[in-house]
Amino acid sequence: MITNLLWTVLIVSAQTPADTLRQLDSAWARSYATNDTVLASKLFDDSLIVTGGRGRLKGKRGEMADVGPSPGFQIHYFRTSDVVPRPYGNAGVVIGLAEWSWTFKGRTNLTRMRYTAMYARGGPLGWRMVALHLGPAPEP
């Protein structure tokens, strides 16, 4: 299992800004898959704005609640693919496909969403997520 310290070392030591953004994308997915609120707290800026798949807005507090464990909710996996990192000086954009499987109240579900994440330099990992937009993904 990769520890928070190891994630920090991997991200900070990435060779290019694009490599760093790709590592941050992996850290973002991992935080949900493992309910790692410590990692998510380092990754999410205090001013984070998330636009959910149904257009609802939430901030860091709401997103942290989604990362953390919840009674009756079990996540089987959370992964990203088709990841394209694009650095722009002190900002960066990552687009990709997020897919996660979860069970709630005995019912297993699969969710697939296209996402765009916006990063700004700064924070404990060298970059911080400042915005996230989730939308419909094409059928597999």
Image (cartoon, rainbow, N blue to C red):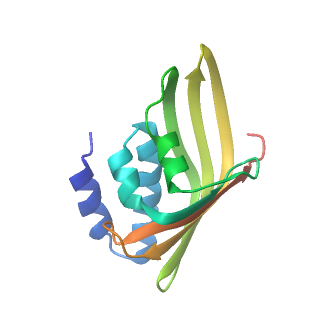
Where residue 99 sits in the image (x, y, percent)? 60, 41
Examine the rendering and report whether any part of residue 7 can be seen. yes
Location of the N terminus by quadrant is top left
Examine the rendering and report whether any part of residue 86 can be seen. no
Disc tally is 0
Instruction: Answer above or below: position of 73 versus 14.
Output: above
The residue at 43%/67% (across/down) is 128
Query: Front-most of 68 and 13?
Result: 68
Instruction: Answer above or below: position of 62 versus 18.
Output: above
User: In the shown orientation, is residue 117 left or right of residue 13?
Assistant: right
The extreme bottom residue here reads 89
Location of the C terminus by quadrant is top right
User: In the shown orientation, is residue 80 left or right of residue 44?
Assistant: right
Q: Quadrant of residue 43?
A: bottom left
The residue at 40%/52% (across/down) is 40
The residue at 47%/75% (across/down) is 120
Query: Front-most of 39 and 116?
Result: 39
Where residue 76 sits in the image (x, y, percent)? 49, 28
The residue at 52%/41% (across/down) is 66
Where residue 117 sits in the image (x, y, percent)? 58, 63
Instruction: Answer above or below: position of 57 versus 65.
Output: below
Where residue 58 sits in the image (x, y, percent)? 62, 53
Instruction: Answer above or below: position of 127 versus 88.
Output: above
